[in-house]
Amino acid sequence: MKKIDIYTSNLCPYCHRAKALLSAKGVTFNEFKIDGNTKLSEEAVQRSGGMRTVPQIFIENHHVGGYDDLNLLNQKGELDLLLGIAK
């Protein structure tokens, strides 16, 4: 299974959607809640190349982006390939 990291915030509806999409795919992920955690917030910004929004999603250290990017990959049929669950 591929390593998936997702930086989230409790109040972010896009974070909840991203987690639901990944869960629906049957994959596990490491969630890093940045709420009140400056160190994790800065880590997310660093890893994403300066993005300050959440969620920030990484699959095997490949920066996917946010929920819209993840969903677009899914709609194009490319997400399963990236996750290693292509049929």
Image: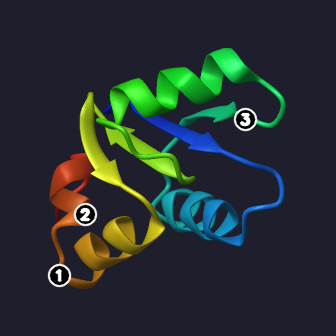
As helix, strand or loop, the secondary structure at mark 2 comes to helix
Total marks shown come to 3
Q: State the residue at coordinates (57%, 53%).
A: 54
Residue 79 versus residue 57 in the image, above or below: below
The circle on residue 30 is none
Q: Amino acid at mark 3?
A: Lys
Image coordinates for residue 41, horizontal then vertical, percent? 61, 29
Judged by depth in the image, the label closer to the viewer, 2 or 3, is 3
Q: Earlier in the sequence, mark 2 or mark 3?
A: 3
Judging depth in this view, the residue of 1 and 72 nearest the camera is: 72
For numbered disc 3, what is the local secondary structure?
Answer: strand
In the image, taking residue 53 as reference, residue 49 lies left or right, namely left
Give the residue at x 52% y 67%.
21
**Label 2 sits on residue:** 79
Farthest-out residue, bottom = 75
In the rendered structure, which amino acid carries the disc numbered 2? Leu
Q: Crowdedness of circle 3 by 10 Å Cα count: few (<14), some, many (20+)?
A: some
Res 33 label: 3
